[in-house]
Amino acid sequence: MSAKPKVGVFKFASCDGCQLSLLAAEDELLTVAGKIDIAYFLEATSHIGEGPYDIALVEGSITTPTDALRIRDIRQRSKFLITIGACATAGGIQALRNWADHDEFVRAVYARPEYIETLATSTPIAEHVSVDFELRGCPINRHQLVEVIVSLVAGRKPKTPSHSVCLDCKRRGTVCITVAQGVPCLGPVTQSGCGAICPSYDRGCYGCFGPAKQCNTGSLSRQLLADGTPAPELVQLLRNYNGYAPEFRRESERLAKLNTEDS
Amino acid sequence: MTQERLIKVEALTRVEGEGGLFVRLVGNHIEDVQLTIFEPPRLFEALLRGRKLEEVPDITARICGICPVAYQMSSVHALEAALGIEITEDIRRLRRLLYCGEWIESHALHVHLLHAPDFLGYDSGIDMAKDYPNEVNRGLRLKKHGNQLLEVLGGRAIHPINVAVGGFYRAPRRDDLTALIPDFEWGLQAAVETTCWLATLNFPDFTRAYDMVSLVHPDEYPMNEGRVNSTTGTSWDVRDYEREFHEEHVAHSTALQSSRGERQACYHVGPLARVNLNRDRLSPTARRVADDIGFETPCLNPFRAIIARGLELIHAYEEALDILRTYRPPTIARIKYEPHAGQGCAATEAPRGLIYHRYEVDDAGLVTFAKIVPPTSQNQRQIEDDLRDYLPRILTDDESATARQCEKLVRCYDPCISCSTHFLKLTVQRDG
């Protein structure tokens, strides 16, 4: 990669929080900014460069026909395309529409639904174009973002952990919230990255970093159901910010079906 | 024959979220001004239905990565109103402390990195840092304090995890909060320096007869509660908000916009409205600095909103320090409740202005209805109205220069377009 790679930051359906993480890296911002050429970052600068880009950081999910075309264009103009955050890697919370009647959703929000042009689904970027690296999280961990940028500049593969939040709780010495308090927790099936914050604040993990590698969602459901968590509640717990990620999606759909068969 | 001209800003920069600006002129007559938004709708009000009420503060936080606390605070207060929950003074103070963290983080970012470059002629805060290293570094450090406070109290800075209906999942440990005091003491002085510096910037001579709206509380600067007051002298209970303030999905624009009263007038929310309506309830240092720099209220120059943000930055530091110094972990961090059917609303003050939420829940504690009105939807018509007035003064043959001037005016409102995703969609051009 050239000495000072050109970086573009692009937004699709999202809250801006993940690209804000770049501005929130206060200690690293000016140093990192000195190592890269910020060619396109609407939130930070009025300077707009056309590309091609060495690194494209993409936030948000695909929810409109226009955006489905725009991501192809960005892909063509970018050497490395990195998706940042749960919207970009899994469809985000707006992917709840994927299980709903989309037209009814639009009618519920808009007085004049005929003006609204959206797709019936919210899908991750990787369903539309090839992605070189996915950085998980809702929001992403800013240290991981800096690691991704620094490693690409150095020409090596980014190192981000893929073990579960559960392991981080053990490392922190947090008493297990499910075992001790009977609170449902996705820690055993969720990828590390947040620092296992929720259990340390006396609440269960709700899956911000998506499915951990080789997670056993079926086993966790079995345990939580046996502990008395109703199936519909488990379905919703799985259908959060990473609900449409394949492992969480399959399990929530299995549980939803189980629930219909039971009743 | 008179020539039609279009002035376009394809992509507004240094704002949160993505939008543009579209002006159509015939000769020098302004035919149309639109703040166009190309944020795809995410349909939050629809997707909230059927979710457990406990999940609402987590979900609504995701409307905006810049001001998640505003969504969390508004939703917990509205749900507590629906359930008849009374929170304790301890919880109330911790919520104000959390909001201080967000105001500090958001205002420090906007003032130093997004807005100041407009007055000093730079494309970005990063470019500005070459010539103004002290100011930019000070801004970054102030912003970091806001984030640190959010991390200690909220668990993390973006989408905090510790906000619950009824209070907090866990009260912070005293040592964790008192450890912040030295930084906040430095920050208070730095915020004063920032505000004095902002007062020396050159402001365009442009004032408007604004109707400004903000919460007003009898004995504190407004954050989490109060009556809705207007500079026209009218005052409403929050429960009457929807009777006075309307959202419209108008035919010529696909944007849902807020307006006030029978005349459907535009109005202005945000730091300038708050300072104008609550100057005597700013913290002592903020009041003193306002006097020292000769900040006259009511201030009706939108460009001077950057000074109002500076004053609020001082206020947030001073109030946070007071809470940090006197903090004792409360015996009850969260009020217990049994879910039951009900409906409730609340308004709070987001960094960008008044934000209103209303929810209905059923006996099982599931959401059946949600309505969310963010600050930027309320300012949108005001911004367009300002531009109509401002354009004749700055209009030249150089359309890109004119567009840049317009963009600077838009940025005074610190618009948060991500927040608007549930009510706005792409506007290209209306029929001539």
Image: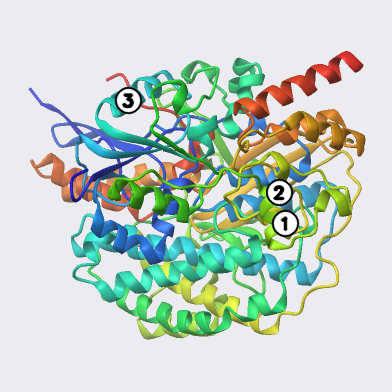
Q: Are marks 2 and 3 in contact (CB under 8 Å)?
A: no
Q: CA distance from mark 1 to mark 3?
A: 54 Å
Query: Do pointers 2 and 3 mark residues of a single chain?
Result: no
- Tell me the residue at 54%/34% (across/down): B422
Give the CA separation, mark 2 to mark 1: 7 Å
Task: From the image, tell me which residue sits under label 2.
Answer: A166
Label 3 packing within 10 angstroms: few (<14), some (14-19), many (20+): some
User: What type is the residue that disc 2 sits on?
Assistant: Cys
Chain assignment, label 2: A
x and y, in percent, of residue B141 in the image: 41, 72
Q: Quadrant of residue A243?
A: top right
User: What secondary structure is found at the residue carrying circle 3?
Assistant: loop
Give the amino acid type for the residue marked by disc 3 in the picture: Val
Kindly identify which chain the residue marked by label 1 belongs to.
A
Q: How many marks?
A: 3
Question: What amino acid type should be assigned to the residue bearing mark 1?
Answer: Lys
Q: Residues within 10 Å of mark 2 (few under 14, many from 20)?
A: many
Query: Which residue bears the numbered disc 1?
Result: A170
Q: Position of residue B153 (x, y in %)?
A: 65, 66
Q: Residue at x 61, y 38 (%)?
A: A210
Side of B339 relative to A175 (left or right):
right
Where on the picture, by quarter, is residue A184? top right
